Amino acid sequence: MTKLSICIPTYNRAECLANCLNSIRLCNSQSTFRFQVCISDNNSSDETEDVVRAAQSDLEIKYHKNTSNLGIPRNFLKVVSMADGDFVWLVGDDDLVMPNAVSDFYALVEAHPNVDFFYANSYHLNTEYLQKFPSPFDTLNLPQAMKQFSSWCQAGVLDFFELISPKISFDFLGGMYLSIFRKQNWDRHAHVLDAEALHATRTFSHFDNTFPHVKIFASAFASSKAYFNPKPLSVSLTGAREWSPMYPLIHSVRLIEALGEYRKKGLPYWKYLYCRNYALNNFIPDLLYIILNRKTSGYDYISPIKLLLANCIYPNFYLSSFYFLGRRFKRIFNRISSRLIEKGSD
């Protein structure tokens, strides 16, 4: 029988991990299907191990604590290597699994046995919401209305490269929690990563240590059938990301490089151009942010002149500033409208 491994890389976020495991515990209580949880602890110094040991009474957990901090990308690879399942779902330690997730996934696999890659939609939620409730958070307390990561609603089987579309996912599979994939494909292609980049100590200094899973996906599933599942199986929490100051680098530099990896493995040229232009929708503001915040933004990893020259042929290179201003004005308008409504109700 097909088996799922939920793989969680973690480091010094015991409270977040407790919430994540509690959501999986509830999921387990509502499912008759067997699954495994793998946790690679990147040498945490907090109560992470205690949280895991407590959860082992209710869940099948394989736990490994690294003797030293391997860095984010190598810890990703480590936790996937621990998996015994046919399929792997990489979940962040600050994410939540929906109560229906495991049952829904097994139903999809049974209905589509030839699919190697499942896009599992997710909800967005700010971490501040969880603070209103006792810890660990119970997913029964989730709000009824949550924004979905992908607004695409057409479920079904498609070629893997059809997933690489801003209509489906603006980050082109960058969010690891969105993907459930066949492990044997991953194992056969994990060697594509550059060892030197993986051992680099500076966060996001190379594409390979920013999106190692994306580079493997591009090789491992280029010829595979995929499935888009519009029903969210997880909740992605915002507000617990230590690397937030480097988001402009990820958005306007590393995502462009991700598209290059897909192009090398067969993404059609016209689609590559379309996606690349879309990905530049905040390029100039992001580049200015990187330059002005060079101590924390990853400025040392880029050449501004080369980036300008490489992207100046795309329309969104020029339109990105207008998009940025439009979004700012929209936020200001929404805030003013909300305050006027609140005053009116008083």
Image (cartoon, rainbow, N blue to C red):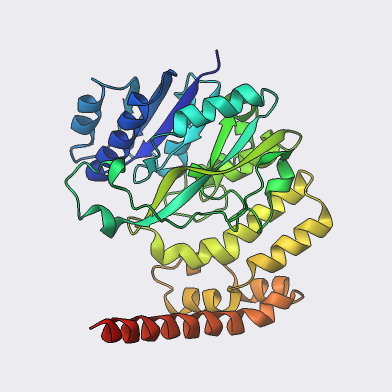
Q: Give the quadrant of residue 120.
A: top right
On screen, residue 194 above or below 65 = below
* Residue located at (20% from left, 26% from top): 54
Q: Say how many tags the image has.
A: 0
Residue furthest out toward the top: 1
* Residue located at (62% from left, 38% from top): 216
Q: Nearer the viewer, residue 129 or 250?
A: 129
On screen, residue 69 above or below 329 = above
- Residue 78: x percent and y percent? 44, 31
Q: Nearer the viewer, residue 169 or 92?
A: 169
Q: Quadrant of the N terminus?
A: top right
Q: Quadrant of the C terminus?
A: bottom left
On screen, residue 62 above or below 45 = above
- Residue 250: x percent and y percent? 52, 61
On screen, residue 74 above or below 312 = above
* Residue located at (31% from left, 22% from top): 59
Q: Give the quadrant of residue 281.
A: bottom right
Q: Is residue 184 visible?
A: no
Q: Nearer the viewer, residue 127 or 50?
A: 127
Does residue 103 appear to the left or right of 345 in the view shown? right
Q: Is residue 169 visible?
A: yes
- Residue 9: x percent and y percent? 39, 37
- Residue 266: x percent and y percent? 79, 45
Q: Nearer the viewer, residue 115 or 145?
A: 145
